[in-house]
């Protein structure tokens, strides 16, 4: 039996939606993107959503909007994919890593507290495997440290504190204190990459509401300018008869989503809770109940949090057994993965001075972690085979 790690959940519904767009005569950013944005806002409980071609683009646009740049610091976790820290570097700022909590792999609020300085402009918590970070504690910390914040532009002056940007690449559909991901932070960025619960093949979105004096429509217009060359009209507007004139209002980027991708997203969102989250939850529970052995099992929910079951990050108590375990599964036709190689272990981040020894919990979890296949298309026979195979290790 062969079990792949994370195939996309694509049905005839998505295929039909894409075909309809291909036949419509308009395939780039247009009415489907707008519809997807509106649907995302409703689902997440926010005022606005801006769809883009990746979560990476979304994080960079938010940092640019806030004016993060040379000499600034942004606190994030070393236990994440490179995009989280790369965008900080793109802006000319310095990534400052705070070690993680052992139980849920998420950034430690206590570690963040010791790292906030007058140079800190933003914090990027990462919801590892879909489990929400401790946002209430993060906001309490940010409020308590407001006296250290040095505003350097009008947007920063209006907010008056460190920005909280949630890297929710893993956590679309997760719940924190009764609210969906997207509504917990100043800005939330989702990924719709091919391996994510909800996919548009490639894609992402920024979710947000008004930030005090900074109204959501103002934010939306500025981010939209940044996302498409800084031009005052998108292609759909420009192509209307007699509407050819536009201006470039700032030096923007090319980060827009297409209607083809949005059509996939609309269809995926319509069946997301029933066809994706529910099966994932059942598989997650099966693993936790039926896998036996010397393992640490991941959290699925607490009193105020529930994951979206994006990953099943099993930990092997004997870290030296991890690589042999992965190879054992591969030999049985099961593709497992490891999330993540901490950033200070990568050659580039080593070369600019980061040392994994400074983040002992991240290193400990990395050495023991194995992500098991978890997705709606897994059959009962595959689930039983996977559990049996692990129990025979």
Image (cartoon, rainbow, N blue to C red):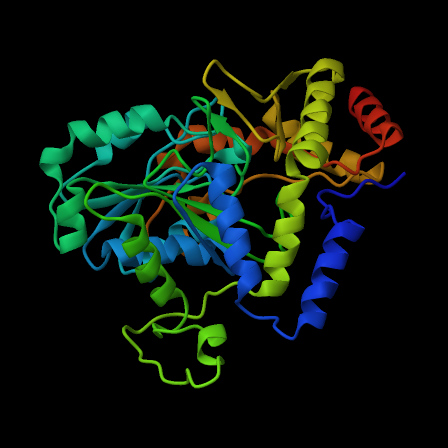
Q: Residue at x 85, y 36 (%)?
A: 332
Q: Where is residue 264 in the image (x, y as percent from the top left)?
A: 66, 55
Q: Is residue 12 left or right of residue 136?
A: right
Would you identify the image quadrant in which residue 32 lies?
bottom right
Of residues 226 and 334, the one drawn nearer to the viewer in this rendering: 226
Q: Where is residue 151 in the image (x, y as percent from the top left)?
A: 12, 48
Q: Which residue is drawn at 44% across and 36% down?
A: 45
Quarter of the figure with the C terminus:
top right
Quarter of the figure with the N terminus:
top right
Q: In this view, does 318 lie to the left or right of 29?
A: right
Q: Residue at x 49, y 25 (%)?
A: 104
Vertical placement of 392 versus 205: above or below?
above
Residue 335 in sight: yes
Q: Position of residue 361 (x, y in %)?
A: 43, 28
Which residue, as the protein is rendered here, is positioned at the far front? 241
Q: Residue at x 33, y 60 (%)?
A: 221
């Amino acid at each position: 039996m062969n079990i792949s790690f994370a195939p996309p959940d694509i049905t005839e519904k998505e295929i039909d939606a894409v075909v309809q767009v291909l036949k419509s005569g308009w395939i780039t950013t247009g009415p489907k993107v707008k519809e997807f944005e509106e649907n995302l806002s409703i689902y997440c409980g926010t005022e606005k959503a801006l769809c883009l071609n990746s979560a990476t683009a979304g994080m960079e646009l938010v940092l640019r909007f806030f004016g993060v740049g040379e000499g600034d610091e942004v606190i994030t976790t070393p236990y994440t994919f490179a995009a989280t820290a790369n965008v900080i570097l793109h802006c000319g700022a310095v990534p400052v890593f705070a070690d993680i909590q052992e139980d849920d792999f998420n950034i430690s609020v206590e570690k963040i507290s010791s790292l906030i300085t007058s140079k800190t402009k933003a914090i990027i918590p990462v919801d590892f495997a879909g489990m929400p970070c401790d946002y209430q504690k993060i906001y309490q910390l940010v409020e308590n440290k407001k006296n250290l914040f040095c505003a350097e532009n009008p947007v920063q002056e209006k907010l008056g504190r460190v920005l909280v940007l949630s890297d929710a690449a893993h956590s679309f559909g997760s719940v924190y204190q009764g609210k969906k991901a997207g509504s917990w932070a100043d800005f939330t960025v989702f990924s719709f990459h091919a391996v994510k619960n909800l996919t548009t093949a490639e894609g992402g979105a920024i979710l947000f509401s008004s930030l005090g004096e900074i109204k959501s429509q103002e934010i939306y217009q500025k981010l939209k300018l940044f996302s498409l060359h800084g031009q005052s009209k998108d292609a759909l507007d420009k192509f209307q008869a007699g509407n050819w004139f536009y201006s470039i209002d700032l030096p923007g980027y090319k980060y827009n989503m297409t209607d083809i991708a949005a059509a996939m997203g609309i269809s995926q969102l319509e069946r997301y809770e029933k066809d994706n989250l529910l099966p994932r939850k059942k598989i997650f529970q099966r693993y936790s109940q039926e896998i036996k052995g010397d393992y640490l099992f991941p959290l699925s929910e607490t009193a105020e949090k529930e994951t979206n079951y994006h990953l099943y990050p099993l930990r092997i108590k004997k870290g030296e057994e991890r690589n042999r375990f992965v190879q054992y599964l591969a030999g049985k036709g099961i593709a497992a993965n490891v999330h993540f190689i901490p950033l200070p272990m990568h050659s580039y981040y080593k070369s600019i001075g980061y040392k994994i020894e400074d983040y002992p919990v991240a290193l400990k979890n990395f050495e023991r972690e194995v992500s098991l296949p978890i997705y709606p298309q897994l059959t009962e026979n595959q689930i039983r085979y996977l559990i049996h195979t692990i129990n025979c290790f």
